[in-house]
Amino acid sequence: MKRYMRTWQMEPLPAAMLSALLPTEVDRRFYDDRLEKIPFDEPTDLVMISVETYTAKRAYQIASEYRSRGIPVVMGGFHATLCPAEVAQYCESIVIGEAEEVFEELMQDYRSGSPKKIYRSAARPKSLTTTPDRTLFVRKKYLPLRLIEFSRGCRFKCDFCAIQSYFDSTHNHRPVERVIEEVKRVRNGRQLIFFIDDNLTSSLDEAKELMRALIPLRIRWVSQSAINVAFDEEALELMKRSGCQGILIGLESLSPDSLKEMNKSFNLMKGGPGQAIANLRRHDLRVYGTFVFGYDTDTKETFETALRFARTEGLFIAAFNHITPFPGTPLYERLQGEGRMLYDAWWLDDRYRYSMIPFQPAHFTPEELESLCTQARREFYSWGSIASRGMHRVNYRDPFMWMNFWAINAMHHWDTEGRNGLPLGDEAWTGKLLKAEEKEIGMFSV
């Protein structure tokens, strides 16, 4: 039987951020369920779990193991903010919003024996000054990629995006000098650094300030950005000079109608994706393009157009995924209102598996849409496609990145459907989910 999740493991930076917020005298242990067995019987006073939608089911299993042993559990993360009534059923306390503004109060309450059920961050943190405690990752087998956070959030309002729902389409960033200090501390030769920002250039002036400060360090880095950065010549020059090797851009679709549906028509600005990629290529910047399918105007031709574009433009890598209606997003609310959701809560339903379609598409059966996404990945990561894209100048000009091109594309070749059919949660778990008393969650709209 396949394990819950054991691929593409990167350092979970939120755990390191929480550890950095703990008082220095507090002993702490960190366990990553993807990598290691959790010692549930190890003595502890308090457990903290970050909950994402895809990991919610497993998080509730883990929480129940600890709570059955009389150990209180605190839960936070994206899913806790987007589905607080649900998450509150499986923990003693829930953190809604970002932790920085409430974490000290939470710790004081637990140390004094008077914890509250809800810790709600009233506003975005005034400044992101915390440096993650990376000692948690020692001797754990993560990918050799250094993760650093510069900013959080995004100003755009794409209807499928849980980021915009969680941060309410706002954006803030860490002081540049703090980021530079961290880069100097974690760099290892010219190993790649991944700025994990949801949209590094959401505030373009601040992003340019960071890039200017990175130039003397001579690092190699990658990140994520909206398409608008491709039309700012100064930003492109600074990206190149500061060591940017590539950027993930949510191309999403080449169909104007689909982009309009997802509130992302800005992707067609100034010539659209083709011109954007040409601009990036001119500065030797590689592109990881992501595409999503399943909007009401999508047809089989939508897949063919996207695949042809991705191969012709020589994208370094690309993703071809169905849209996922995450709770709390406009997309989820629309599909639910139209009666098109196939599960009450797909992330908890025992029938649901990775890559399944949790809603009724307009022009496909759910199985057809799933199959078309898988087929697009197979074709894009076929050896012929990899070889063809590898001969694009932007992909082979730098020997280090060309070596990475072959390694990463080979991994994708063997993993085009590696997650398909995996359960959300551990099917081998035989425990019982423990829920809070109804009165404890009465303050939520359940």
Image (cartoon, grey):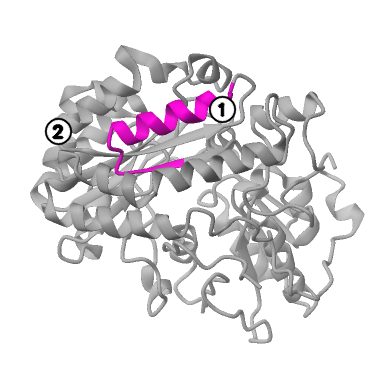
Q: Quadrant of residue 414?
A: bottom left
Residue at x 44% of width, y 26% of height: 305
Magenta-tinted stretch: 298-319
**Which element is circle 1 on?**
helix
For disc 1, the neighbor class at 10 Å (few under 14, some 14 to 19, many from 20) is few
Question: In x, y percent, where is residue 360?
Answer: 74, 32
- Name above or below for residue 406 compared with residue 229: below
Q: From the image, which quarter does the N terminus lie in?
A: bottom right
User: Which residue is depicted at the point 19% across and 60% down?
Assistant: 184
> Dot 1 corresponds to which residue?
300
Query: Which residue corresponds to the image point at 48% horizontal and 15% vertical from the top-left?
Result: 256
Amino acid at the residue labelled 1: Lys
- Name the kind of residue labelled 2 in the image: His
Residue 204 versus residue 26 in the image, above or below: above
Q: Which mark is residue 283?
A: 2
Where residue 235 appears, x then y in whole percent?
A: 20, 29
Quick check: is 96 in the magenta stretch?
no
Q: Secondary structure at mark 2?
A: loop
Task: Give the crowd class for mark 2: few <14, some 14-19, many >=20 residues within 10 Å.
Answer: some
Front-most of residues 204 and 257: 257
User: What's the CA distance linking mark 2 and mark 1?
Assistant: 34 Å
